[in-house]
Image (cartoon, helix red, strand yellow):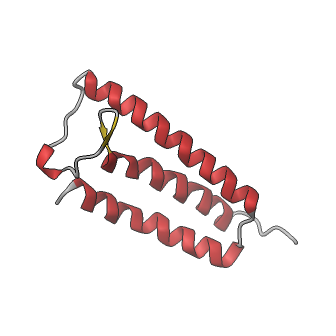
Amino acid sequence: MSYAMLAGLFLLVPLLVLAVTVVLRRPGRRWWATTAVTIAVLLMLTAVFDSLMIAADLFRFAGEDLLGPRLGLAPVEDLAWPLAAGLLLPSLWLLLGPQEER
């Protein structure tokens, strides 16, 4: 199984939770903006620190299982994990939190 396939499978649950949250809670612009900024920061930090860890030879990726594009030294597949966290956690917070009155 390639890293991209694993990342795709891993993203299914956060995307499903996001879809349920959008249907049930109808998040506003502020929620979307905050979530987007959070994801952008997580992606940037992942690219920087994964590049540093790869440069320090703390871990390696099997080249034949990668798509090829990289951000710094980090393969793009490695960005799926912060993307999943950035989608899943705010969605769960909104979905499972108290219903706000409108």
Examine the image and state in which quarter residue 5 appears.
bottom left
In the shown orientation, is residue 25 left or right of residue 79?
right
Quadrant of the drawing holding the N terminus: bottom left
> Residue reaching furthest right?
102
Percent from the top left, x then y, of residue 49? 40, 29
User: Between residues 59 and 43, which one lies in front from this camera angle?
Assistant: 43
Percent from the top left, x then y, of residue 22? 64, 73
Percent from the top left, x then y, of residue 72? 34, 33
> Residue reaching furthest front?
69
Q: Is residue 25 above or below residue 87?
A: below
**Residue at x 87%, y 71% (from the top left corner):** 101
**Residue at x 40%, y 62% (from the top left corner):** 11
> Residue reaching furthest left?
64
Q: How many marks?
A: 0
Percent from the top left, x then y, of residue 70? 30, 41
**Residue at x 23%, y 52% (from the top left corner):** 67
User: Between residues 68 and 1, which one lies in front from this camera angle?
Assistant: 68
Q: Is residue 90 above or below residue 101?
A: above
User: Between residues 99 and 57, which one lies in front from this camera angle?
Assistant: 57
**Residue at x 48%, y 67% (from the top left corner):** 15
Quadrant of the drawing holding the C terminus: bottom right
